Image (spheres, grey):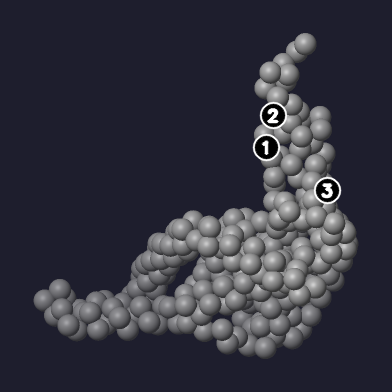
Amino acid sequence: VHLMKKLAIYRFLYALRHNLPVLLLYLAGGYLLSSILFTFTIGTLFGDYVWQHNIELPDLSAQSERKARVQELLYTVMTDNYNLLLCEAMLVLLVVIWLIARRLPLALPKALYVCPAGPREKLRYLRIYLTVKAVFLALLLAALTLFWTGTLILPAPVLAVQVSLTVFTVIAFSLNPDPGNRKEALKKCPDRVTEKSSQTVVNVYWSGLLLLENTVFYACMYALPSFGWLTAACWIPALLINIWIAKRHLTPVLCTMLDYEKIYYPLPDDGSAGPQ
């Protein structure tokens, strides 16, 4: 067990270092996108606020007074629409975390396919790797949220729903197995490539469902005048669905990686691929 832990942590850190330039590019792109989105949103809200309240700004000749007035109005607009800006930031962050997760797929070292380790030990390795990856993504999401929004403190009912959604979102994003040579196999011998139902459920349907749940959750934060425990209780069915999906499909997804030929399909030589 100790050896599997060390191996899983080492392999994850190696994958992280190997993909570091791309991950930094994703972070920079997300920051740029959120900045553009914030600027557009605040500019639109500012214009609407000035127009609705018939506010007249000081003349251009009074630069200091005009600047102070604009800053005061901007602060008012941002305070009144804090939940909207928070929603935009979190949705951009979730996309960034999803992209980062795709660059760090779950993978068994090829040496484990030929060593005498049994399926139980290999599953233990994959679960440890999954845990390390999920913890990393959760900490990264928390750090980015703190950096971009300035706070992690929310009202208790909001925080309860957000934490539950975040946990399952991170798990779903982390369950992306190494594709191996699947794309090449689909071109050369598509009849050998089988669909992995649990993997499809997790990577497509569950991830899509969680993105939808997050979108609805942050939209409710913005639209509802208050988000109390009664509103939070409405998320219990979604929580139960997520628990059921995780319990039903987590282990099957990991088990699909135990067979080497289901990850790295044996391909015919180019000379024998054509008609005989």
Residue under the image location 66 percent in, 74 percent down: 135
Three-letter amino acid code of the residue under disc 3: Asp
**Residue wearing tag 3:** 259
Q: Residues within 10 Å of mark 2 (few under 14, many from 20)?
A: few
Residue farthest to the top, as pictured: 276
**Residue wearing tag 2:** 187
234 and 173: which is toward the camera: 173
Disc 2 + disc 1, Cβ < 8 Å: yes
Q: Which mark is residue 273?
A: none
Measured Cα–Cα span from mark 3 to mark 1 = 17 Å
**Residue wearing tag 1:** 183
Three-letter amino acid code of the residue under disc 1: Lys
Location of residue 100 in the rendering, given as x and y in whole percent from the top left corner: 57, 60
Measured Cα–Cα span from mark 2 to mark 1 = 7 Å
Which quadrant would residue 16 be assigned to in this image?
Answer: bottom right
Q: Residues within 10 Å of mark 1 (few under 14, many from 20)?
A: few
